[in-house]
Image (tube, grey):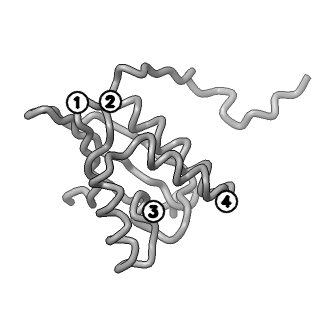
Amino acid sequence: MADTDTDAGTAARSGSPDSAVDRVADFYGAYIDAVADGTDDLSDELRGHYLNEDLRRRLAAWEEVNHADGVLRAQDVPTAWEVAYQDAGAGHLFTTVTLIWGTGPDAGTTRLAVQSDLSTKLISDIEDAPA
């Protein structure tokens, strides 16, 4: 039987609900799928589950001004994403989310700095990552 999975040669993925880094990766993976599939209710539900209330309010204000998706900081949907641990301190965990736009050598990237609260594991801030 032919393998139709384009990721057939890649490493297995894993995660833990106790890991704030895994939760950021789970959120971005599911959110990008929901936006790409056009399931608006699901993307809103994911925001409600993974993002704290204050961030949801700030994202709504950012989106009103910028006419773009505040989680992705764009009007389009990335073709891929990566999440990496950055730092932790003062009750927060910091990750860098890299969004990949397009494919091949001309693919562009956007880096986001994502903060999670360790006590709730909810994402509490999303900003453009410093250069």
Q: Amino acid at mark 2?
A: Ala
**Pointer 4: what residue?**
38
Which residue is drawn at the image coordinates 44% and 47% (left, top)? 48
Q: Is residue 20 placed above or below 12 in the rendered structure?
A: below
Q: Report, in whole angstroms, how far the alpha carbon at label 1 lies from the one at label 4.
A: 31 Å
Mark 1 or mark 4: whose residue is earlier in sequence? 4
Residue 39: image quadrant is bottom right
Quadrant occupied by the N terminus: top right
**Is label 3 in contact with label 2 (beta carbons under 8 Å)?**
no
**Element type at mark 1:** loop
Q: Quadrant of the C terminus?
A: bottom left
At which x and y percent is residue 120? 28, 31
| Residue drawn at x 37%, y 46% as measured from the top left | 51
Residue drawn where x is 45% and y is 72% of the image: 68
Q: Which residue is mark 2?
A: 20
Mark 4 or mark 3: name the one nearer the start of the chain.
Answer: 4
Q: Position of residue 123 (x, y in %)?
A: 32, 43
Residue behind mark 1:
118
In this rendering, position of residue 33 left or right of residue 75:
right
Residue at 35%, 56% (x, y): give it.
56
Distance from the alpha carbon under mark 1 to that under mark 2: 7 Å
